């Protein structure tokens, strides 16, 4: 999993769980994709987008790990056919980090339809789609166990049958937002940005409670797959506090694993290197460029990047294969809007 059902709060209502975040160059501009409500939560889990929640793309444009721009989606109750009304707002500057601010309405519409803003360069699609992520279930569990216990990655032997992705045949609810580069840069003032996704639920007291947060892929499955307290802390901590909060824990866990695997000459130094690389937990991207999420470079993330293999190899300082490629996905992503594969 990349971020699927990563904490108790996320498992309590899958509509609030961000399974993945993507940022890449689209047909008209920069594309932001947030996938939530994975079928992996089970058939009895609530479906769709939560009508009392906010789904936000947060963007840092100054390098301080604090949002300077936010695109906020809210949804209404579903009609008998399952379609939900939606509203998109933009919040700029200090307002982007203030739950009490309302921002400016950019677009309204309904899920399951391609929607355009007044300038036609702003495009939105939301709805049920094929999950573009793929993962070998045996490898992800072995990695999680290793980083929990400070042991080697003990990948189970294959029985000869082809490896099947953990998410084969499963669907998610996707939020796809495309913004022209000119409009995005007019708000950021720079090409170099950092992006993360947040879900928040309205409280009885009138405020908002953060449920899930997703920046780089695989952080929670690697470091907190079997540590619910750490998983919850990863979701609740703001990015600006990531370095102070998680550096020691991540560097220690990496050092233990690479030490056992004997893949780094100085395990503690390598652990610090990995912590420096992944903290703050924000996805970097240069507006106008092709996304590439690789071992050597994090620059956005396309729908076809093998993020699991990249992050496993980084964390273990070794070439750790998951024996799967993008061909393991049942409904491949496309090069045209909405980029994800809509599902009935």
Image: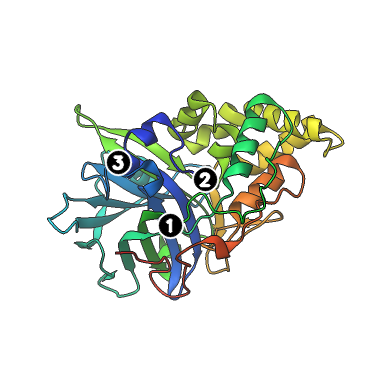
Q: Identify the residue under disc 1.
A: 169
Would you say the residues marked 2 and 3 are in contact, meaning their CB atoms lie under 8 Å apart?
Answer: no
Q: Farthest residue toward the left? A: 80
As helix, strand or loop, the secondary structure at mark 2 comes to loop
Q: Position of residue 241 (x, y in %)?
A: 52, 32
User: Residue 126 occupies which quadrant of the picture?
Assistant: bottom left
- Residue 281 pos. (x, y %): 55, 41
Q: Residues within 10 Å of mark 2 (few under 14, many from 20)?
A: many
- Left or right: 262 in relation to 224: right
Find the distance from the CA under tag 1 to the CA under tag 2: 14 Å
The residue at the point 33 percent across, 69 percent down is 122
SS under mark 3: loop
Report whether 203 appears left or right of 183.
left
| Residue bearing mark 2 | 1
Residue furthest to the right: 265
Rate crowding at label 1 as few (under 14), some (14 to 19) or many (20 or more) other CA atoms within 10 Å.
some
Q: Is residue 111 above or below residue 336?
A: above
Q: At which x and y percent is residue 4?
A: 46, 43
Label 3 Cα crowd, 10 Å radius (few <14 / some 14-19 / many 20+): some
**What is the spatial separation of the Cα atoms under label 2 and label 3, in whole angstroms?**
18 Å
Q: Which quadrant of the rendered structure holds the C terminus? A: bottom left
Taking depth in this image into account, of 327 and 341 the one nearest to the observer is: 327
Please state which of residues 30 and 97 is positioned toward the viewer in this rendering: 30
Disc with the residue nearer the chain's start (2 vs 3): 2
Q: Residue at x 73, y 39 (%)?
A: 273
| Residue 297 horizontal/vertical position (percent) | 67, 56
**Picture quarter containing residue 40?**
top left
Q: Earlier in the sequence, mark 1 or mark 2?
A: 2
Q: Please give the count of numbered marks on the rendered protein.
A: 3
What is the number of the mark on residue 45? Answer: 3
* Residue 280 visible to an observer of this rendering: no
- One can see residue 136 in this view: yes
């Amino acid at each position: 999993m990349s971020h699927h059902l990563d904490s108790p709060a996320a498992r309590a209502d899958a509509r609030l769980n961000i399974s993945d975040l993507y940022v890449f160059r689209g047909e008209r501009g920069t594309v932001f994709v947030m996938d939530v409500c994975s079928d992996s939560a089970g058939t009895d889990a609530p479906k769709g987008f939560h009508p009392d929640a906010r789904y936000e793309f947060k963007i840092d444009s100054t390098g301080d790990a604090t949002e300077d721009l936010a695109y906020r989606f809210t949804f209404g109750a579903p009609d008998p056919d399952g379609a939900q009304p939606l509203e998109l707002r933009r919040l700029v500057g200090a307002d982007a980090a203030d739950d009490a601010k309302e921002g400016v309405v950019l677009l309204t519409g309904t899920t399951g339809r391609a929607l355009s803003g007044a300038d036609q360069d702003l495009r939105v699609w939301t709805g049920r789609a094929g999950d573009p992520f793929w993962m070998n279930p045996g490898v992800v569990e072995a990695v999680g166990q290793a980083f929990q216990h400070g042991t080697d990655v003990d990948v189970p032997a294959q029985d000869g049958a082809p490896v099947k992705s953990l998410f084969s045949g499963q669907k998610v609810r996707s939020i796809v937002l495309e913004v022209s580069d000119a409009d995005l840069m007019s708000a950021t003032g720079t090409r170099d940005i950092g992006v993360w996704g947040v879900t928040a639920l309205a409280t009885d007291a009138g405020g908002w409670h953060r449920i899930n947060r997703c920046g780089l892929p695989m952080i929670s499955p690697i470091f907190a797959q079997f540590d619910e307290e750490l998983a919850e802390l990863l979701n609740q901590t703001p990015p600006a506090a990531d370095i102070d909060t998680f550096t020691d824990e991540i560097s220690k866990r990496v050092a233990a694993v690479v030490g056992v695997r004997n893949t780094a000459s100085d395990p503690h130094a390598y652990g610090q290197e990995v912590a420096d690389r992944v903290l703050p937990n924000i996805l970097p991207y240069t507006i106008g460029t092709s996304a590439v999420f690789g071992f050597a470079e994090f620059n956005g993330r396309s729908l076809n990047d093998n993020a699991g293999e990249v992050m496993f190899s980084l964390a273990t300082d070794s070439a750790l294969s998951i024996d799967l490629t993008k061909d393991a996905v049942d409904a491949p992503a496309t090069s045209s809007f909405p980029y994800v594969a809509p599902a009935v």
